[in-house]
Amino acid sequence: MTHLARVSLPLLAGAALSVLAACGPGTPPPAAPGPVEAGAALPTEVPAEDSHDAHAEDHAEGEAHDHEEGEAHDHDHDHDHDHAGGAAHVHGIADLAFVIEGSKLTAELVSPLANFGLSEADGVFTPEVIAALPGFITLTGGTCTAETPAAEVDTSSGHADGHVNFTWTCANTGGVTAARFAGFSAFPGFEKVNAVFVTDTAQKAAELTPSSPELSLK
């Protein structure tokens, strides 16, 4: 054996041992994935379709809640509007409406009892006030005869309001030119009367006061 052979053999043997050590039984192979047990739950992704449906359901619930709140608000809003739209009970102020019906001219006065100097707790017209009612309103023209006014008290609103109905039979309703509210002088509790006159062809309105107590009907 030559000198080269004696040197090469140990080197080759060392290299072989190194290879065997790297690939030998001491290095375990990579573990293979184990079998899945029957009935075991596997992680799944939520389909995009289901996610969209869930979002739509939440959105619909939110809209329904907002709609219910809106309806409640509208309901409250509608309730307040109806109450304010009715005739207001304000001391010192009254409403007076005139209407022609054939040969008759009628008027209705709606006023808090306090304007007559009466107690709203008692809720009645006194004989003294009833005796003064025929002179409350006077007409100009038309040759009209007044009937006895009819008075009653309405407490349905929670307040005591007096309703007085006046009726005149006229020879010529078209000849009536004006109506004067004379209650200002007899009862200082009246400060303002909102008067209206309605016919088939016209409507007039005026705010009557102690200094301007007359409503023109022409």
Image (cartoon, grey):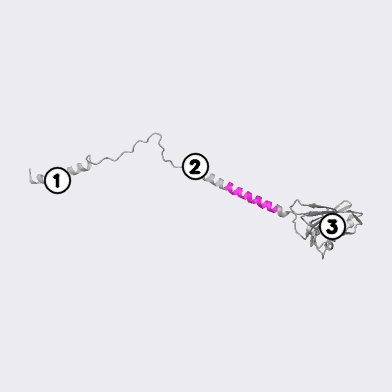
User: Is the stretch drawn in magenta largely helix, strand or loop?
Assistant: helix
Per the rendered image, the range of residues in magenta is 63-81
Q: Residue at x 54, y 44 (%)?
A: 57
Quadrant of the snapshot with the C terminus: bottom right
Q: Secondary structure at mark 1?
A: helix
- Numbered circle sitting on residue 11: 1
Q: Secondary structure at mark 3?
A: helix
Q: What is the residue that sits farthest to the front in this orientation?
A: 122
Question: Nearer the N terminus, badge 1 or badge 3?
Answer: 1
Q: Amino acid at mark 1?
A: Leu
Quadrant of the snapshot with the N terminus: top left
Q: What is the residue that sits farthest to the top in this orientation?
A: 38
In the rendered image, which residue does mark 2 sit on?
A: 50
Classed neighbour count for the residue bearing mark 1: other residues with Cα under 10 Å, few (<14), some (14–19), many (≥20): few
Q: Is residue 27 magenta?
A: no
Task: Return the residue nearer the eye: 19 or 144.
Answer: 144
Residue 186: x and y, percent? 84, 62
- Numbered circle sitting on residue 129: 3
Q: Amino acid at mark 3?
A: Val
Q: Amino acid at mark 2?
A: Asp
40 in relation to 63, above or below: above
Question: Nearer the N terminus, badge 1 or badge 2?
Answer: 1
- For the residues labelled 1 and 3, the Cα–Cα distance comes to 141 Å
- Number of numbered discs: 3
Classed neighbour count for the residue bearing mark 3: other residues with Cα under 10 Å, few (<14), some (14–19), many (≥20): some
